[in-house]
Amino acid sequence: MLSNSDLVLVAGATGGVGQLVVAKLLEKNIPVRALTRNKDKASQMFEGKVEIVVGDICQPDTLPKVTQNVTHIICCTGTTAFPSSRWDFTNLFKATNTPEKVDGEGTKNLVAVAPNNLKRFVFVSSCGVLRKDSFPFNLLNAFGILDAKLEGEAAIKASGLPYTIIRPGRLIDGPYTSYDLNTLLKAKTDGKKAVVLGTGDKLNGETSRIDVANVCVECLNYDNTIGKAIDIINSGERPPVTNWQQLFAQI
Ligand SMILES: NC(=O)c1ccc[n+]([C@@H]2O[C@H](COP(=O)([O-])OP(=O)(O)OC[C@H]3O[C@@H](n4cnc5c(N)ncnc54)[C@H](OP(=O)(O)O)[C@@H]3O)[C@@H](O)[C@H]2O)c1
């Protein structure tokens, strides 16, 4: 059970899901350490409510101080599936923040510096990792994002740390941070669609960033989510209260 004597590191805290994860932890009075590459951006965003630590998961030497004394890590870092400015091109042919670097190597770097007594490592992966050779995931994987997510998952599983992997569908709902059509359309569930969980990477659909953040935090209160890869989409009418205990019991 999460308590206010825990310290949760949120990697990717300034991102869409990351901001919501931070908000949800603060709502539960859980101390948060936010990992960011840009201190000013994070300071402005979190207004002194969290501890801010500067680091880059692609640069291992920046990381040991980041994980010191943390009890949980929620990793929601990410870059774009297709080339964009977020890949941080140093020239036309070289980029330092590609899926391979961030989702693959970066995740491995973070796993390598996790404390031995970590209570949980939660990793936001993606649906399609086990179906990357079939349509439409083969297109999504054109620049290796699903290969890299799977590599990240494998590093976490091999680490021996208690882990939970989350595999959402295409993300919808704000904060609108991804460079895709959803950003332009600002697709919203308005909190009206129910949470559907599964295992084995069999679900298809869209997932609200709000519920990705919810599942990342809620799973920490349930030991039956340890060692699981959880698929999550939104579908059907949302009940007045989402019963996470019941949802987790189904998987
Ligand atoms: N978009 C989709 O449809 C989709 C589908 C399935 C799964 N996902 C996954 O869902 C997660 C959340 O997605 P999102 O759209 O909410 O994320 P996002 O807004 O793109 O945020 C990504 C975060 O990662 C951080 N980051 C990037 N490179 C980093 C590095 N080298 N070191 C440290 N931090 C770094 C960014 O920080 P800066 O502020 O420094 O850039 C930002 O906080 C990601 O893991 C994504 O891969 C997305």
Image (cartoon, rainbow, N blue to C red):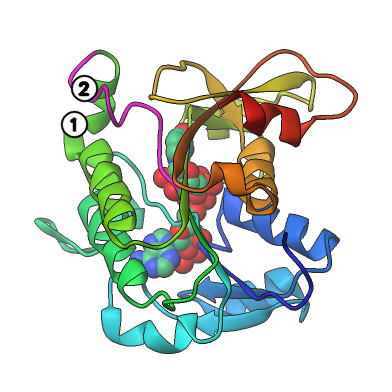
Instruction: Give 54 or 127, whichever is nearer the viewer.
Output: 127
Which quarter shows the N terminus? Answer: bottom right
**Does residue 87 appear left or right of residue 7 in this picture?**
left
225 sits left or right of 189 in the view: left
Give the quarter of the image for residue 190. Answer: top right
Residue with the mark numbered 2? 138
> With respect to residue 132, does 212 lie above or below?
below
> Can the viewer see residue 152?
yes
- For the point 58% across and 74% down, the residue is 71
Q: Are marks 2 and 1 in contact (CB under 8 Å)?
A: yes
> Residue 107, image x and y in percent?
33, 61
Chief SS of the magenta region: loop
Q: Relative to residue 84, is residue 8 depicted above or below?
A: below
154 is higher (above) or lower (below) than 25: above
The magenta stretch is: 124-134
Q: Is residue 135 left or right of residue 190?
A: left
Q: Is residue 130 magenta?
A: yes
Residue closest to the eye, 11 or 251: 251
Amino acid tagged 1? Ala
Q: What element does badge 1 sit on?
A: helix
Specify whether residue 179 is in view: no
Q: Which residue is mark 1?
A: 142
Write the residue at 41% across / 52% down. Answer: 78
Mark 1 crowd level (few <14, some 14–19, many ≥20, 10 Å Cα): few
Question: Residue 22 colored magenta?
Answer: no
Indicate the amino acid at tag 2: Asn
